[in-house]
Image (tube, grey):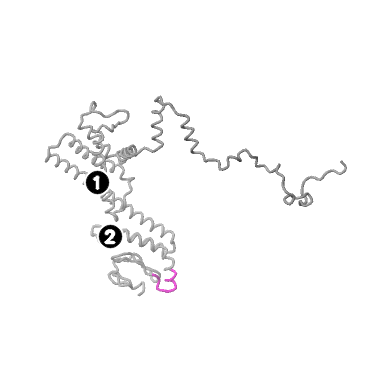
Amino acid sequence: MSIADLAVGEPDGIGSTIRIIYAKKPPEYAVYGTDNRVLVMFADDPARADKQRVRMSRLNPLRGEVNGLVEDWRLKPGSAPRAARYDRCVADALIVGFEGDIAAATALLKSIKQGILDERVATARFEYLVVAFVTGVAVMLAITLANAIAQYGNATVDLLRGGAAGAVGAFFSISLAIRGRTVLPDLQRMANLLDAALRMVIGIIAAVVLIAFIRSGVVSVNIGDAALSGRNAPDWLLVLIYGFVAGFSERFVPDLLAKASATTSAPTAQERVEESAPVAAATDTVVDTEAVEGAVATTVPDDPAPEEAGIDSCACDVDLPDDEVTGDADLPPASGGVALDKAA
């Protein structure tokens, strides 16, 4: 099949129906689109086609990535125009490559890929916010319904109010940080939805835990230099503020729990010694020095030969037999040194 034979609505060389022809330059090349992707047809001359195939193969990885990013858009009626728009951009990049500028074609395909990723991430951010908002509304409705059905005490009502305020604080935090928050493209929708719901649940649980800590008297919260207390705000308003702060800050309650686990761990031997030292110094205790010296002495090993403790081990004064003594004549000649002045 030659390039001149290509026509819209007709099958190409591999049996795919041609939906659009972007460029057709017989007998050099052709760029056209099918239902699934953008395709090319190389020159009619086999030798020239081989050279084109080698040169254009550098673009194949980027072409595959772009095609994978828009694949599901082709199957959605409402998203088909977006896929067609990016197919047109890919075709333009391939035409530039056929005309000899592979570097520019590569740059164009990279730009197209980044544009698709940005669009998909923007969609994922919107879905992230929607899931977070729905989760917060569902929790607040559940709290309102539970409070209406059962007559809880003041402590339980405070916990419920704190959880609702924590949901609001978590959503506010997500809304402020959504631009800088790492959100995956909408191709990985399930991971994004789970992360959004989990962030809201963490904010709600953190708010309830903080209210419980404050009601137990183990934690106090300061805003700047001012301490929050019932003297400057009613109790219900304090509960809402505490819950909002816990839901807004992801690390506030986890840091409190980390400190609590650190203080409840068993003290080390060194810590026990340091704790007991001031107590021993404050009491009038008589130390038995003989017992201490005896205890120290038991830690020193015994001398294996105490009768030889006073013997000098130097061999300069020891008389050696003649067969163990080397005479001066048997010593090797001396080397080096400074020669004596015979005239002196």
Chief secondary structure of the magenta span?
A: helix
Q: Secondary structure at mark 1?
A: helix
Residue with the mark numbered 2: 72
Residue 40's x, y, as percent?
A: 36, 67
Say which residue appears at 43% left-offset and 71% top-offset.
50
- Residue 192 in sight: yes
Residue range of the region highlighted in magenta in the rendering:
42-51
Answer left or right for 297 relative to 91: right
Q: Label 2 vs label 1: CA separation?
A: 25 Å
Residue nearest the observer in this picture, 234 or 36 = 234
Residue 79's x, y, as percent?
A: 26, 57
Q: Quadrant of residue 55?
A: bottom left
Residue type at numbered disc 2: Asp
Residue with the mark numbered 1: 132
Q: Secondary structure at mark 2?
A: helix
Answer left or right for 295 relative to 139: right
Q: Mark 2 packing: few (<14 Cα in 10 Å), some, or many (20+)?
A: few
